[in-house]
Amino acid sequence: MTCFRRDKPCATCPFLMKTKLALWHKSQFEMLKASNANPFGNTFGCHMDVEKEPTDRGPCVGWLLDQKRRYVPSLLLRIELASKPEAAEHFERIGEAGPDLYPTIDAMFEANEKADRKLRREAAKEGATIIGVDKRRAMSVPRARTTARSRKVSTK
C-alpha cells in the first residue's frame, strides 16, 4: 500500500459497528480472523481501492485503528511503519479508535455471521435460496455492490 490519503474509515468499513451487517462475504471475515491469529499476518487495504492501480491503493483505516488500539500486533504493519515515513505519519494522523469500532475482530465476525444467517432464513421463508456468491468478487467489495452475476438466487 502506497497511498495514505484517508484519515477516517470509509462509510462501509466492516470495522465500523454502524456499517450494514452482512455486506461482506463470510470468507473475508474468516481470512481476517486467520490473519489476526498469525503475528506476521497481512496488512489490509481499503475495499474502496480494490480496482485501483496498486500505487493508488491505501490501507483500511478501520483496520489501522484496530491495530493501533491493540498496540500494533501485526509485525508486517510494524515493519511498514518503521520503513516508510509516510506510513508512520499517516498512522499518527488517523488518531485513536473511537467507540464506533467493534471491540474485537471476533465480535465483528459474530455480528455479521448472525446477520447473514438471518438473511438466509428470510430468503428461505420467501421461497428463495442463496446458492452461492462469487468469492473472489465478494471478498473485494461489499455484497451490496456485487453484480447480478456474482450472486445467484433461485426460486422454488
Image: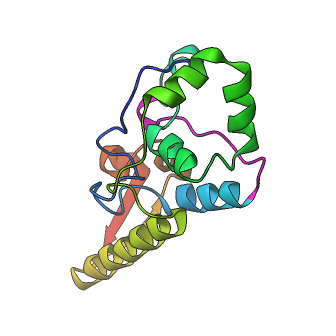
- Compared across the picture, whether 125 is left or right of 6 comes to left
State the residue in front, 83 or 18: 83
- Compared across the picture, whether 125 is left or right of 117 comes to left
State the residue in front, 77 or 113: 77
Q: Is residue 154 above or below residue 85?
A: below
Instruction: Identify which residue is drawn at 49% across, 21% down.
Output: 4
Asked if residue 111 is among those painted magenta in the image, a careful observer would answer no
Asked if residue 39 is among those painted magenta in the image, a careful observer would answer yes
The image's colour scheme reads rainbow
Looking at the image, the residue that sits furthest to the left is 126
* Residue 113 appearing in the image: yes
Number of callouts: 0
Q: Is residue 8 above or below residue 15?
A: above
Q: Say which quadrant the C terminus sits in.
A: bottom left
Query: Residue 1 falls in which quadrant of the image?
Result: top right
Q: Position of residue 53 (x, y in %)?
A: 54, 17
- Compared across the picture, whether 39 is left or right of 136 comes to right
Q: Is residue 6 above or below residue 63?
A: above
* Residue 136 appearing in the image: no
Q: Position of residue 9 (x, y in %)?
A: 37, 39
Instruction: Identify which residue is drawn at 44% across, 72% down.
Output: 113
**Which secondary structure class fits the magenta region best?**
loop
Q: Position of residue 82 (x, y in %)?
A: 72, 25
Stretch of the chain drawn in magenta? 38-49
Q: Position of residue 128 (x, y in %)?
A: 29, 75
Query: Residue 145 falls in which quadrant of the image?
Result: top left
Q: Is residue 1 above or below residue 152?
A: above
Instruction: Identify which residue is drawn at 53% across, 32% down.
Output: 59
- Compared across the picture, whether 97 is left or right of 123 comes to right
Instruction: Identify which residue is drawn at 36% across, 50% down.
Output: 98
State the residue in front, 63 or 70: 70
